Image: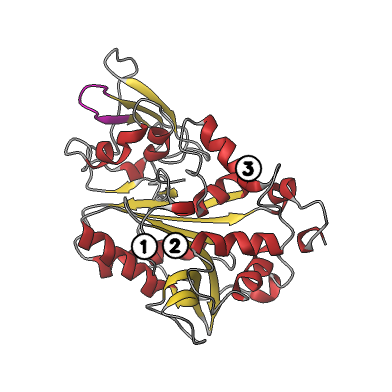
Amino acid sequence: MSEISRTGPQSGVLSESSIKKTAKNKGDFSAVLARAGKDGESAPLTSQAKESLGVITSENYTVSHLLVRNSKFATDTWNIIHSPINQNKDFTKIQPGAQVWIDPETKEISWRQENLAEPAVQTRKNVQVRRTPDLSKEADSLAESLVRAVSQEIGKNYEDVDCYELVVKGLSSLGIQYSGRGGLKDALMNRALASSLPSNAYLTGEGLVNACGNHLFSGTYININDPDVLAKEVYESLGPNLRHGGILSLSTRTRGHTGVVAARDDQWTYINSGRMDNNIGDRVPSLGVGQEDLLAELRNWFRLAKSRGEALSVSLGELNREKLMAYAAPTPGPILV
């Protein structure tokens, strides 16, 4: 796991969830909290006191996403979400189509959701997690190509390849233009500036998924009491969405991390660059690129979040070939084959 501070490429306002979202954690992310009301917090149809933050969509799929895109509340996003008036709200009940409001004075978040039959994040305590995908069906897929590309970086030191650069290197090897005019980095920075955010806000794994993929799971977890149990529950919730080549991002208020989901010896793994606490197989530097046990890595991050008294956002997404084609390098690369 990486405990690298949120500076450099992985810094910025959390968290595209997101994502999850939050799942839906994250981002930018929904929060797994105690219930507040029957099926979620409901805002009145008309309220002069409240301001609209917008609608939960596939692009803005958590409350934190809406907050960081609001010039008035962006810098106070995490304080608002973790404030006493909001910390016990069940944000995981919010689904696409919900209208979200904020009281400008108390900063209380509320929403109106027409259909809450299924929560945005569902903890599946009895789900049998799919241990490994059928790779024979993905041998020629974009996902498999990405896994092979990042695997070639295993063994390199963190100072040479950090977690975000690892994913970027993988994309570049597939023929995607990241740097330079018209490249993917340019597009991500322009998108951030257009949203009144720091230019590097979307230079994250979630930012890449937002621009060139689809979100599969996102969730934000606060008030973490038993990190090991919660890590297992989140792992089980991830189960139906886990796939070879998925982009998994983990972030707290002060730490950010991303990497690529893979499989080895019938277990889900996480190819990333950081502190190798749970490395399997190849010998790697203690701080560098390696392949770790996914569940163990989740457990470490929940432990870290608890020790720091911070929320943890978990976001999983997958890249889309058609969306990536918009950033294909002038000289055709493997992705165009």
Identity of the residue drawn at 38% across and 53% down: 6
Q: Earlier in the sequence, mark 3 or mark 1?
A: 3
Give the main secondary structure of the magenta stretch.
loop
| Residue 291 visible to the viewer | yes
Give the position of the C terminus as an image quadrant. Answer: bottom right
Residue at image mark 1: 234
- Circle nearer the viewer, 2 or 3: 3
Identity of the residue drawn at 32% across and 37% down: 77
Q: Where is residue 164 in the image (x, y as percent from the top left)?
A: 52, 59
| Residue 125 visible to the viewer | no
User: What amino acid type is highlighted by mark number 2?
Assistant: Leu
Identity of the residue drawn at 47% across and 45% down: 16
Above or below 178: residue 241 = below
Near mark 1 (Cα within 10 A), the count class, few <14, some 14-19 or many ≥20, is many
Residues at marks 3 and 1, CA–CA distance in whole angstroms: 34 Å
**163 sits left or right of 327 in the view:** left
- The answer to whether mark 2 and mark 1 are in CB contact below 8 A is yes
Part of the protein shown in magenta: 103-110
Disc number for residue 186: 3
Which corner quadrant of the image does residue 55 belong to? top left
**301 sits left or right of 183 in the view:** left
Residue at image mark 2: 238
Residues at marks 2 and 1, CA–CA distance in whole angstroms: 6 Å
Above or below 279: residue 322 = above
Is residue 109 in the magenta section? yes
**152 sits left or right of 160 in the view:** right
